[in-house]
Amino acid sequence: MIELYYWPTPNGHKITIFLEESELEYEIHPIDIRVGEQFQPDFLKISPNNRMPAIIDRHPFGLPADDGSAISVFESGAILQYLAEKTGKFLPTNLRDRTIVMEWLFWQMGGLGPMAGQNHHFSQYAPEKIPYAIDRYVKETNRLYGVLDHQLEEKDYIAGEYSIADMACYPWVLLHKHQQQNIEDFPNLQAWLAKISERPAVIRAYDKAKSFAGQPTITEESKKILFGQTAANLKPEK
């Protein structure tokens, strides 16, 4: 059983997509980031960066030196890698193909996600609209879309075969309108996006998110929680 600590954000969607694709048994524990549940001491024990998603695997795959006790994993990229290795799915075993998948997984974690996230912040959530900041991140998002569009030339999926690289990138590109990107400028990316959107497991993953909708994700009060963090917030109980 996988216990998934989740909220319906792009990083949260990555993990429900994998879990639905792999048909692993899992249970969602909502972490409402709007009200600060990510700072609860019990959550900080498994996710010290006070970010979801995180998982607890109650039945981890066993290595000879492993005692079989539960394993917790935080950071969405690390979770995808862990689950892929656990199941033997969506991550090639041969060195060359595996390296390509891991390159694009890290590209998303270090580039597309952070840059698109800053794009969202300065365009939609910042109390003061700073033209330089908005222009900086909209243009950088555009550059990254171009990189991915080029990678997808003559390919159905980022690394050739469907993998955790696609699962990592898809939830961020799906928000192209929020990022002020015209997806029609990137025909390979547009075709890839449509192809993944039609996968039954992806549809199921996004259906899971609907039960957490219904209230504004961001309010003035939640902005103070989400964007006003300091080290003082990160004090898990011993």
Image (cartoon, helix red, strand yellow):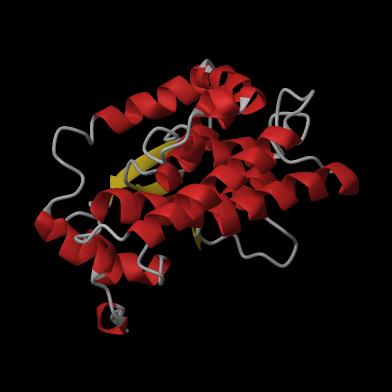
Image-quadrant location for residue 94: top right
Image-quadrant location for residue 50: bottom left
Q: Position of residue 236 (x, y in %)?
A: 31, 78
Q: Is residue 62 left or right of residue 180?
A: right
Most foreground residue, 72 or 170 = 170
Q: Is residue 65 left or right of residue 109?
A: right
Camera sees residue 77: yes
Picture residue at 49% right of the left edge, 57% below the top: 114
The quadrant of the picture occupied by the C terminus is bottom left
Most foreground residue, 33 or 63 = 33
Picture residue at 46% right of the left edge, 32% below the top: 174
Camera sees residue 57: no
Image mark count? 0
Picture residue at 74% right of the left edge, 52% below the top: 103
Picture residue at 54% right of the left edge, 52% below the top: 140
For residue 232, above or below residue 17: below
For residue 66, above or below residue 57: below
Most foreground residue, 78 or 159 = 159
Q: Position of residue 175 (x, y in %)?
A: 42, 35
Q: Position of residue 1 (x, y in %)?
A: 46, 43
Image-quadrant location for residue 209: top left
Residue furthest to the left in view is: 221
For residue 71, above or below residue 172: below
Q: Position of residue 74 (x, y in %)?
A: 48, 61
